[in-house]
Each structure stands twice: as C-alpha cells, then as structure tokens.
Image (cartoon, coloured by chain):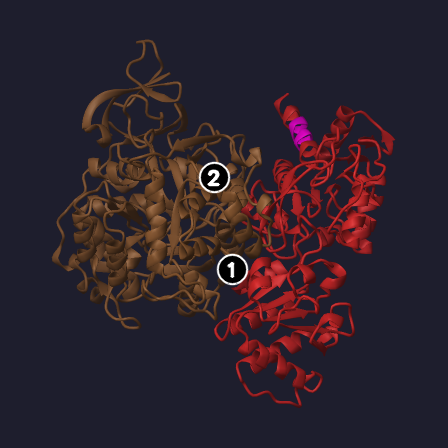
Chain colours: A red, B brown
Amino acid sequence: MAGGALAGATRTCPLGDAWLAERTGEAPPPSRVDGREADFGEAVDAAAAILRDARLPLVCGLGGTDCESQRAAVALAEALGAVIDPSGGAGGAASQAFGVSTTTFGDVRDRADLVVAWRADPVSTNPRLLPRLRLDRAGRPPGRSLVVVGAEESATAAEADELVELAPALDFEALWALRALARAVPLERELAARLPLDALERLAARLRACSYGVVLHAPAGYASSLALLALVRDLATLAHVVALPLRFEAGARGAEDVLAWQTGYPGAVSFARGHPRAWPGEFSAAGMLERGEPDAALIVGFDALRGLPPRASDHLRSIPTVVVDPCATETAAAARVAFATAAAGVQREGTAHRMDGVPLTLRAPLASERLGDGDVLGAIQARLAGDEGS
Amino acid sequence: MLRIAQGRVYDPANGVNGEVRDVCLDGGKVVHELPPHAPRVDASGMVVMPGGVDIHSHIAGPAVNAARKLAPEDHRGDPIDRTELMRSGTGGTVPSTFVTGYRYALLGYTTVVDAATPPLAARHTLAELRDTPIVDAAFLVLMGNNLPLFELIREGGPVTDAVAWLLEATGGYGVKLVNPGGVEMWKHRNGNVTALDDEVEGLGVTPRRVLEAIAGSVDELGLPHPVHVHCNNLGVAGNWRTTLDTLDTLQGRRAHLAHLQFHAYGGTPGKRPRSRAPELAEHLAAHPEHSADIGQVMFGPATTMTADAPVSAVLRDVTGGKWVNADLEAETGCGIVPFEYRERNYVHALQWGIGLELFLLSRDPWRVVLSTDHPNGGSFLSYPRLIRLLMDREFRNEQIRRVNQKAIGRTMLRDDLEREYTLGEIAIITRAGPARLLGLADKGHLGVGADADVTIYQGRDDVEEMFATPRWVIKSGRVIVEEGELRETPAGELLRVAADHDEGIESTLRPLFDERYSVRFDNYPVREPWLLEPARRIAAGPGGNAR
C-alpha cells in the first residue's frame, strides 16, 4: 500500500494480478441507467421496476461475490419469485447421486502420497495451487506422486510423474474401466481397446496402494462426474481416497453453500411458486436463457455475455438486465441498469468459502465510498418491499 | 409487558410443580409483578413451562449443509412457502436454516445447541445460525482430534490456554470431543482406535490422554458446560465397556456424554449387540459429576451426520446408499449417511429400546436429558412422540409390541417398566435440566431474572399432540407463536462463552498452526462483527455450572 492505493501485491499469480487490476482500475460511475450516469436512488427505482414487472426474472452470477452478498441475492430472488442459478454445473447433481468423499487443502498438502489430476490443469487455472499444496515437482516431498490424466502435454502434465494420455471423449469409459481395475474385476481387453489400459492398470494399482489419495478434477458433465465419484467411492473401501473439485471463481463454493442452507438445494433454484424447487438442469441459467424463458435478469459479478453460450447470450441481449459488478464488463455496459460496486476482498470486507469449503475472511485493503454487491441488492429489495407496502 | 395468568406452572428449577399462578414478563425477563392493567394471556387450564432447551442437535455448519445438499429428495416433499413473516425453505430431516428456526419455535423450543463445529469452519456455522431465526443458539467446538492440541498434550504444553483461545477465536460455547484420536486415525488408511489406550499413530497421544487433558482444561477454566463427549466405539457391540472406561477416566471431573444410547451396547464386536443400559444408568446414578443426553432413536427417516467419520463408513456399508466423507485439516472429519430406522429391524429396535430403558431407569432427570441427536436418531419434530412414550405406559407398551421382539427380549422393556414421566419430569428433561447442564443460568426456568422464554400448552389427554402444538410460545417476552402459527420471527442471540486465556498462548500456537493449516494463524480467529453479533457472553469461572 502507498498513499491509500495498492502499490503492489505479493504471493499472487498472473490470474490474481489480473483479478486485482480489474477491481482497482478506473471504475465506471457507481450507477447507470441505459448507459448514462444516474443517481443511486433513480437506478434502484429503475432496477426494482424492471424486476417487479418481469414475469420470470433470472438471478445469476454469484460466483464472483462474497457470502454476504450471496445471502442478499438469494433473499432478493425469493422475494421476486425468480429463478436463481449459482452456476454450479453438473458436478453437484452427480454428487447427489451417491455422495462424495472429499477433503481440504491442508490434508492434501500434509497427507497425500498420491494426487491424480483428472482432466484438470491447475497450473493454468489455479496457478498457486500446486506449490501451495507441495504438489509441484520442486515442492513434492519424497514418496508423493502426481499423475495427470488428460489429452496431451499440459502445464500440469509437465509437473507430473506420469501422464496418462486420454481423449476427452473417453473419460467415462476410462473411469468405468478404472473401477473394474481397482476392484480387480477382469476386463475384456478388446472391448476396452480404445483405452490406454496399461497406464490405467498402473494407476489403479497406485490408487489401491496409496495411503492418502486425492483426485483433483475440474467441473465436468454429469456422466463423467458420476463415474469419477463412483470410482472414488469404490476406492474408499480399499484406501483413503478423496476427490477435490477445482473451482475457478473465488465465490463459487460459497454461492452453492449459501443457496443450500437457505433453500436446501445447492444448484439452480426456482422461487416461482413461492418456495424453492430444484431439478437438475431445469433451472440452469444457460438452459433457461437458451429456451428464451426469462424476461429480465439480475446479474451479480458475472460477465454473462462472455461467459454464457451464444444462444443464451443472444436472449440476454434481448431482455432488460440489471448488473451489479465491481468490474467494468461488457455485460455491465450493455445493461439497462448497472451498479459498479466496491469489490469484496479489495474495498469491502466479507467472507468467502474456498473451493474446499473452508470459510475465509476477506479484508478490505483499499477504501471506497462505493457500496458492496450485497448493499445494492438490499437496496433493491427494500425498494420492492416499499412498493408492496404502499 | 405480559402477564401469563393462571396457568399450571411447571418450573422445576424453582420447585414449582403444576401450581396455578401468574408468570410476569417485562423487558425480556421474568419479573416479580406487573401492574394490573398489563396485557395478559389467559392460561387457565393450560400448562406453562420455560421455553425448551435442546442440549444436543445438529442445525448449522458444513456437515449439516453437506447433508442438505446430499438429499434433494428429503426436501421435495416438504416445501415451505414464503409469507409476509417467513422466508421460504424446505424441511425433511435436515431443514433449511430458516425452517429450522421456525420449527423449533413452533415446537416451543427457544434455545438450541449445535453440538459439533470444527473451529476452522466456525464462520460457516455462525453464518448459518444468523439465518436461523428466533432461537438463541450456541455451538460446541470440536477438539478431540486437533493436531495442535495433540502436540500440546504430548509435550505437556499449555492446553488450557489453547482451549480458551480456540473458544474465543470461534465464538463457541463449549468443548466437544468426538471419538478422540479415532477420527485422526481415519485419515491414516481408514483406521480407528478401539480402546482408550490405543496410540494415535505417530502422534504420541491416546484417547485417554486426550480425554484427561481436555476435560481437565474445561474444569480448570470453569466453563459453564462440562466437556461434551462422544465416546470412542460408537455403535459397536460391546462398546459399553469403552463408555464405562471413559466415565471412570473422567471420574471426579464434570463430563457430559452425548447420545448415550449409541454407546450402551453389550455383546462382542461384529456380533448382535444387546442392552447394557442398566449398567450405565447405575453409573450415572452414582456419579453426580456426570450427565448424558439420550440420543433416542425414533422409527422413520433420519440423517446420520457425525464428525466420527469411521462410523459413517460402517453405516455406508450397511445401507449401500448415499455417503459423504469430508476430511477437515488438522481438526476432524465428517461423515453423512441418510438412514431409516425400522421397527422390524433387530438393531434399530434394540437402539430404540435402549434409549427408552435409559430414560426409564434414570434416577435423576436433571442429569439424563432428552435428545434424538437430531437428525441422527430422528428429527427434533419427533420429540412430542418421544415424550408420549415416556409419559404414557399403555401407548409405550403398544409400541413395544410392534417392534422386533428378539431385540426387546435383550432389554428390560420385556419386564414392562412401569414408570411414567410426570409433566414436572418432562419439564426437567426438556428445559430445566439441559439449561442447568449447559450452565445457562437465565434459561430453563421462570424465576425472577430468567429470560422471558415461555411455552404454553393446552392440556390434552394426548400428550403427543399437546407437545407438538403449543398454544403460545413467547421468546424474550414477545409472543412468537399463537394457535400454532408464527406471529413474529425475530433474530435470536448467539450464546458464547467468555473464558480468559494468557495472551502468550498465541506465540505457542502460531508455529503449530502455520505447520498444520492451509490458513494463516492471523486469519484463523473470527472477527467479523456481522457473524458474531448480537451475542451474549456467558462467563466461565470457578465452580463452572454449579448453581
């Protein structure tokens, strides 16, 4: 810190530096309506009007903000009878099928003798993870192995003891074969001819023999997630093996947690009938937008126009949107109402849940006059409640 | 101001047993008298008790939330609509936070203790408690598998200061030990400990040393609630010997045993268990320094959730169904298995029977109090049925005839235990007793100065119905429930302990933390005011909870 500004950051990765720059650079006006600067009250009125008049409003994003703001977003979605999607993906639904065995960073760092990065490239997506958990080549203690399963050489594969090359389309098959191999069930090799069976056999042997095994994996489709969790469950009777899903947004896990404690469901929830309902896939933001269902959207901390599939973005462009985001995004620029907020962990204190579920305190090294995401959401809800009261 | 007029008052802490009298409330407290014009509720013909106090329940934090996430089917059939007063949510065995608060209040409970929070996850528990309305809540901090504490215990370090520091750092109320040593062993190739003198591999401590050290520290600090112990060998046939060994180890020291029913099994491991409830009841009768809650099993759906991860792995293999395991660095583990207790199942019927035996053989209701270990033995919503089982011998015998008779044959229930709990005794095991064991001097009674938490029941022949639907529930002097409906949904308070520690402990703990956690020592203590307030501090001090 120097003169109230950020002079530099230590222990960050390039992604962290970019994240900080986005939240400390020149900010747009705090509130805008139709792209013009507006005073806060006017913007709140406009946002409340859009959301109140909508037949089926959508609330999405949330992975970029703190737990306090996530609480406010769920409360507002409920008051609106909206659909809310914390963008958890299909892995959550798979873990509901028969559960999951998991862990936290400290136990990976201090106990793991085998780590498998399955279709995950943390060196690119979470660059500090390997060194922090002593999984990089230089930091690994004796007796610890890193095996990468992926399509080809990746930055993470360069750190590994072994790379098991596997085309992405073969994930399910390979995981299912591993289940058999881990339990010493004979495989018909001709049927598994597309798989690198020798390498999978070696991996199965490592998994069976390890004392603390960890499978790091990235968000994947339902079937692959299911197969991976099934494998870990099978292994749990043979060895202490756990899975740890990587997340790429700082608030992704918290969004899921807050939604679950307030509604009972970790994935996309509809409040349209006055109580929470959740069916895997049905209320996903991308799916609903692709089907053209929402007629207004409240987007919190998410550059939806860039992050969603093209057809979903197309629909988003055609409906009125309210954006609450500390960053100057394309989505914010295109919004009917946009609030540029103070960022949690930069100008606002808060709490976030790390990808392993450990709750962390977020400090505010920089001062800001601006409101946080949750304050803006609360103001919109108060305005709506005022309408109801009058 | 509110006068509760002419009810039959059950206030066992003050020796009031069904006498007709007024209870006066003002400023959130019970007061001696009110002016004649003060507003009143006419409680004539009704039963007036202090608000219920749940000494052992699982309502908030990462384990509870993992259970919510795991079982959408548990929620779908039980949706709760948003109203002007209420947030929406879902019920089932593990309700969402708002619904948890509403349903406890609707049941006449106004204070709830969450029995197991890992210190590292305190922020999560606190955030959920803030979204759990109406009830005052406290949580117990898990310390039985804590690596820095193990190190201090092994080296003869300042354990007591470390315990106090952990409580202060988390906003916790009391100390919980879960399968001391065994959960750490779970992380070593799915191991466990099976006896109090088993060594925790590579760490130089045994369950017995952990029990002695932590219980000693809790006593030394004079915490209002004694050490709260979930013994080793939960659910294992023959575990009553471990339970007695634990109690003998803690002889002369205050200790509370959690869900005693799950620790009262005779027989040999791997074979069919039988009841050893009489022996444990005998021990408790002879040891005024020891207490227990029952952890009654109720037939129907449940969700087992415990820091005792190896037990969950056993349950996983029993059900073959959903299972969550969650290791938490340096502190604990967690296991979750949705479960159903069935009347015809030998083990389930035996568990049910042992719980009832413990209740019926108990000679001091102040020290053997009601719990289902919600949601492990069943939901807190089953308390009214449990109360009926205790109060109504005919109903109980009907139920006994429905369940697995081989199991009943291994208990004393076959001899028709005649005891019927009185309303006064129910008031003890559901409010006065738990409040006293917790050292909550302002809870669980209706003497002048007590918190104005009052539950008023319509007297009925069917006590299950009576306890399921209080006529009024008053929290901090405000009418929260009327005619079975919520009238207000104020926030409750966090109840946390205030225990002194030597500031120098931080320099001892810092290196132990930095080696073992992925979170820096300075970021570990909860400081966020929005998580910690509003709170009430209950002071530790000499004498602990002696009142």
Residue A251 vs B81, above or below: the answer is below
Q: Main secondary structure of the magenta part?
A: helix
Q: Is residue B118 above or below residue B206?
A: above
Hey, which residue is sitting farthest right in the picture? A36
Q: Quadrant of the C terminus of chain B?
A: top left
Residue B327 is tagged as 1
Most foreground residue, A171 or A108: A108
Q: Is residue B136 visible?
A: no
The stretch of residues the image draws in magenta is A378-384
Amino acid at pointer 1: Asp
Residue B305 shown left or right of residue B398 in the figure: right
Element class at badge 2? helix
Number of numbered discs visible in the structure rendering: 2
Residue B164 coordinates in the image, percent (x, y): 43, 41
Q: Provide the chain ID for the residue under circle 2.
A: B
Q: Which residue is mark 2?
A: B168
